[in-house]
Amino acid sequence: MSDEPRVSRDLTYVWLAVSVVGITAGGLEWWAGSHDAAHVVWAATTAIGLLPLTLDTVRGLIRREAGVDLIALLAMAGSLALQEYLAGAVIALMLATGQALETYADRRAHRELSALLDRAPQMVTRYEDGELVVRPIDAVRPSDLLFVKTGEVVPVDGVLMSPGVFDESALTGESRPSERPEGDQIRSGAVNAGSAVDLRAVATAAESTYAGIIRLVQEAEKQKAPFVRVADRYAVIFIPLTLAIAAAAWLLSGDPIRALAVLVVATPCPLILAVPIAVVAGISRAARRGIIVKGGGALETLAHGTVLLFDKTGTLTAGIPHVADVEVFDDLTADELLRLAASLDQVSPHVLATSIVRSARERGLTLTFPSDVMERHGAGIEGKVDGSHVALGKTSFVAASVPLPRRARDVRRRTALDGSSCVFVAVDGEVAGALVIDDPIRPDSPRVIRTLRRAGINRVVMVTGDHPDVAESVGAALGVDRVLSERDPAEKVEAVEAEREEGVTIFVGDGLNDAPALAAADVGVAMGARGATASSEAADVVLIVDRLDRIGDAIGIARRSRRIAEQSVVIGMGLALGGMLLGAFGLLIPIAGAIVQEFIDVFAIVNALRALRGEKQVRRASPATHVADRFRSEHREFAPEVQRIRNVADRLGLMTPEETRRELEAVRVFLLERLPEHEEEEEAIVYPIVAEAMGGEDPMSSMARAHLEISHLGRIFRQLIEELSEDGPTPEDLMDLRRVLYGLHAILRLHFAQEEEAYAWLSSSEDDPASAVPAPVSG
């Protein structure tokens, strides 16, 4: 089958109308007793259908592509030669109907993809000399101040200059509008669902998120699946088989009508209808789930994936890191250091940049738009802010020609042990401080990995540029098979190529430095919701919904689409073969054969369209998602308090007695006043909901047991601080306090992570309109 359609889309319905009119008019003539006139009309209908078919068949033969159109051509020509005019006209109607059904199915399958294209903004409203002027979207440049009206699509990626409410359902699949504070980055393609807002552009239209998605959609629509080319090779086998059966029927019976009946039943083969429709339907269903698949080739390869490689930051981790601490090494204040770093990071697409900017905004710091910015992917970014040269990133980037301060080495060691990240900041060539950034593991990451293993992924590898201590800590928590740390973009490519020996590789990443590995893998999957355009361009599959469980959905959709295509082909060809044998034995006349084949084609197309729908799933109770969201929100509020417990334990013995008492009292208030209330409400409100959804016997027992252990350690801590003398803790007190505080820090982090996973599992189906127990991804 060639890339261009067998009959022009514009002529499909014209051909169908002519066929219907011709058969109807001939039938009326026959009913009126004018048999000769009826034969003339039917013959003319056959001849009209034969013209475009002959043209397309000749074109295919010139390209050495022998399709089943050849069988249709022989059947229609044979009908004219053997004066089976009605059979020829029915074949013409059958072909026209098949083309019309294929056109309809193709348009329906492309519906979600086309919807993205139709929303693309063409004009923007820009501030120019204090006035609002409408300009073409291509005129937008970074730092331009734009005005986005209520109901308008955000034209380019930018930074909000005022709070706003946005509907991002077209990008993320989430139906609920999201409130965004001033200073947040907003992606193009979102719809302003609140009051008009001002937006500071950080990219051109061509470089923005939505334009990248549109390019992906256009690529997806242009691609042709390898499975379709396999269908063409099936046709090469099917043609000689059909001709052999037809020739044998003629030779053994001496009746050419039997040969014609064989040809009629064999045309057109459902092979060329079902496969592309199932593939495109799968791509369309994936688009509805926030998954852009770049054509059938990627869908087919994804279905065969067995080795999964993950980047860490923004992929396995939450992708919403937060600044846990600001360390300064010179005369700058912590706020000024953070302000300079955040000002520069306003234009960076890196996943950590948003967290740095957000932290500065939350502290009420006024940011300046940077100039002369240069970013080295995977290393850092530098530029000018308020006349100062600012650089932030890895030590090798910011301190390439200056010695690293002693305190900087201490910070780097501490963050490596904690499993957090450290971004160093240099001002005018001197390392001025560091930002300690905590990027927790996504709550659903362990569950997703377990689900993927059950689905047939037999090897999971984490590839990251992080320090080995950080990488091993995350890898152990997730249960991956191998951890590859401190890998630069080139080494990530080498890792992908090495793992290819184990099977078909799938690489999942989000950043610019992941782009080479995404391109090198058999299937590259980009977490495009917060990732960079370059990684999305290099990938074969882009998750525009920032949820890791969509990888399982993508694999499930790919496998189900492939299975449905194969079913349609095998069943359709089997039915056609059965009809051919009936025709060969004289049990099926040409007209009846044409009608039978019409039903076979309709069945193949309708069956292929099943790929648009998901598997039937078992509905479960629908607890309100906001219940879990509330407690997840409280976990985020508690995160600084949990980190304070660790920091106090580290600094015991270094603080003054007054400072020690103040810090211990803050920990006491959290442990004995705020936390118990949270845990009591959790057990009373949300635990029963999660337990009912999970099923089984008391699935939340381990978490309830953790509450008891936290309460026990809290009582010990209270007793210790009540017994402290006015002069401060003794060496024995310090030992006991550290032991309890480190224990509390460890169990709280583990307990919150367990609860987050349970709540994420609950919400993973609640957020989906088809809320149900997750279907097996094997589809």
Image (tube, helix red, strand yellow):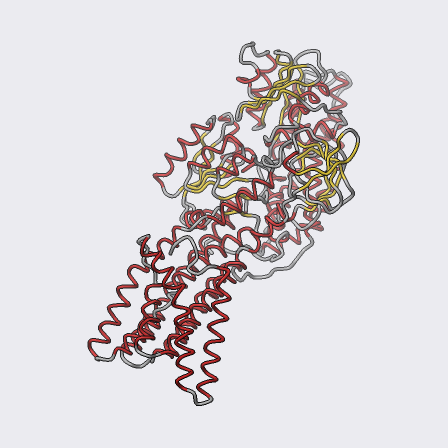
Residue 234 image offset from top left, x and y in percent: 32, 59
**Residue 278 placed where, x, y %?**
46, 58
Q: Quadrant of residue 209?
A: top right
- Residue in view at x 34 percent, y 63 percent: 68
Q: Which of the 4 image quarters holds residue 386?
A: top right
Front residue of 643/674: it is 643
Place of residue 684 in the rendered image (x, y in percent of width and height, measured from the top left): 71, 50
Q: Position of residue 399 (x, y in %)?
A: 56, 14
User: In this rendering, is residue 70 above or below 717?
Assistant: below
**Could you say which quadrant of the image residue 589 lies in?**
bottom left
| Viewer can see residue 318 | yes
* Residue 259 or residue 628, whichever sits in front: 259
Which quarter shows the N terminus? bottom left
Residue at the limit of the structure toward the bottom, as seen here: 33
Question: Outermost residue toward the left?
Answer: 252
Q: Camera-side residue: 13 or 539?
A: 13
Callout count: 0
At x 71%, y 19%, the residue is 334
Query: Relative to residue 602, is residue 315 depicted above or below?
Result: above
Give the residue drawn at x 26%, y 77%: 256
| Left or right: 561, with 54 as reference point | right
In the image, taking residue 708 as reference, residue 696 lies left or right, namely left
